Amino acid sequence: MDARLEAIRDTVLARNPGEGEFHQAVTEVFESLGPVHDRHPEFLEGAVLERLCEPERQIIFRVPWVDDAGTFQINRGFRVEFSSALGPFKGGLRFHPSVNLGIVKFLGFEQIFKNALTGMPIGGGKGGSDFDPRGRSDAEIMRFCQSFMTELYRHIGEYTDVPAGDIGVGGREIGYLFGQYKRITNRYESGVLTGKGISWGGSLVRPEATGYGTVIFTEEMLKTRGQSFDGQRVVVSGSGNVAINAIAKAQSLGATVVACSDSSGYVVDEAGIDVELLRQIKEVERGRLKDYEARRSAVSYVEGGSVWDIDATVALPCATQNELDGDAAARLVRNGLLAVGEGANMPSTPEAVAVFQEARILFGPGKAANAGGVATSALEMQQNASRDSWTFAHTEERLTEIMIGIHDRCAATADEYGDPGNYVLGANIGGFVKVADAMLAQGLI
Ligand code: NDP
Ligand code: 2IT
């Protein structure tokens, strides 16, 4: 890492002890930015990095609620408003027991650059709670969401901060959150949340957008080597929103997705994952992946273990951070891997990324490859602002254009900085320069 940047990075780490994932995300971005500061000394003079690593605002709050047994429950809520240089804070809410300030800050930091890469007018933020939705009834989820919004409502707004979903937060939760926001404020403010239901202000394609976008981005990478998804053997991790839609899109392009996972285990289905069955189990029944095995022939379910033990030519990690380590990366590379598209945020450890880059594997980092979700959220905001709703075909076309645009900007930036094919460099520099320019133009704030 460039010595000037390393000194700033060390201060950031010392000021934010115990936030391992945030440290990892900051280090990863800083490692790309040395050459930018040679060309743009004004970024150092303007303390752009010091400012970017200090969120504009961080909100931590108590979320009290009552479970079905009548027991009082107390969770912790977060919203970290990182950067509004390019637009209102924008980013998802994650409900998972592992959520803490360091996780929310890593996600919010990544979101700044991701949102810049989309070319849409959105800043970066993230939030969530250590609430565990697993095994909770619908009524419990509703009461939790209502309590969460009873604090969050005063911090968000169409022109301020626009949350959406992430792990554990989908259409159902956005509905309960929106209802409570409306009730408290007495305003039908569609633009305050994205990922809404289609009949009440949502956008077609938003549910599919992250998974579809990841596959579109990966297809563009494959094209640079004269390849495509057609005929590829694909492994996807996770079986949530991003994973299911990545599987659907990859198979529509002629790939066979042979395995996917949840936090309990993975299934191998050599004939190709039956997406409709997977949707039925995970989205309709809210069941576990284990249930897939009994309902389809010639399928094996492996309890525990890692889905990355299964060979693939294309790997799409779509579950969570640091799920694919250096050993798994090395094994995949030895066994014929061509490309990795990160549907999740920071799923590959730094060691895994180093293995992929060393082997010149096509590697699309999350902040570029999974930007289709937030980009379609921005399209939802556009539709809300104009009180319009677009067709599926039109919205999908916009998503495709945006993903191809992100791919091409990352590739062009990597070329410009002398490392063709390095999408990590392209994404970090491409996103950063846009934000840095806006920050300097807006003065010291
Ligand atoms: P979902 O909650 O719909 O699904 C998450 C999936 O990942 C589930 O299969 C879950 O398994 C698995 N998972 C979660 N945590 C862990 C863990 N600690 N270990 C192993 N498996 C785990 O979330 P999404 O699909 O929305 O999100 C997946 C990833 O994509 C996240 O990294 C998210 O930040 C990222 N992302 C999401 C976007 C969106 O629009 N939703 C946009 C861009 C990125 P289980 O059910 O067993 O917990
Ligand atoms: O990580 C992400 O980009 C998301 N969870 C989606 C954020 C959004 O505002 O749609």
Image (spheres, grey):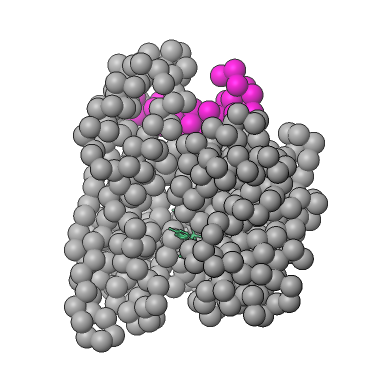
Residue in the image at 52% along x and 47% along y: 324
Q: Examine the image and state in which quarter residue 209 appears.
A: bottom right
Magenta stretch prevailing secondary structure: helix
Q: Residue at the location (19% across, 63% down)? A: 62
Looking at the image, can residue 240 be seen? no
**Was residue 435 drawn as part of the magenta stretch in this picture?**
yes
Q: State the image coordinates of residue 314 (x, y, percent, origin top left).
A: 68, 47
> Is 431 one of the magenta-colored residues?
yes
Q: Is residue 150 left or right of residue 249?
A: left
- Residue 45: x and y, percent? 30, 16
Q: Quadrant of the N terminus?
A: top left
Outermost residue toward the bottom?
A: 69
* Residue located 40% across and 17% down the image: 2
Q: Position of residue 413 (x, y in %)?
A: 57, 25
Q: Nearer the viewer, residue 257 or 201?
A: 257
Report whether 106 appears left or right of 269: left
Horizontal side of residue 204 vs 443, given as left or right: right
Quadrant of the frame with the C terminus = top left
Q: Give the residue drawn at x 70%, y 66%.
A: 269
Q: Position of residue 365 (x, y in %)?
A: 54, 40
- The boundaries of the magenta stretch are 412-440
Hey, which quadrant is residue 144 in on the image?
bottom left
Residue 23 in view (yes/no): yes
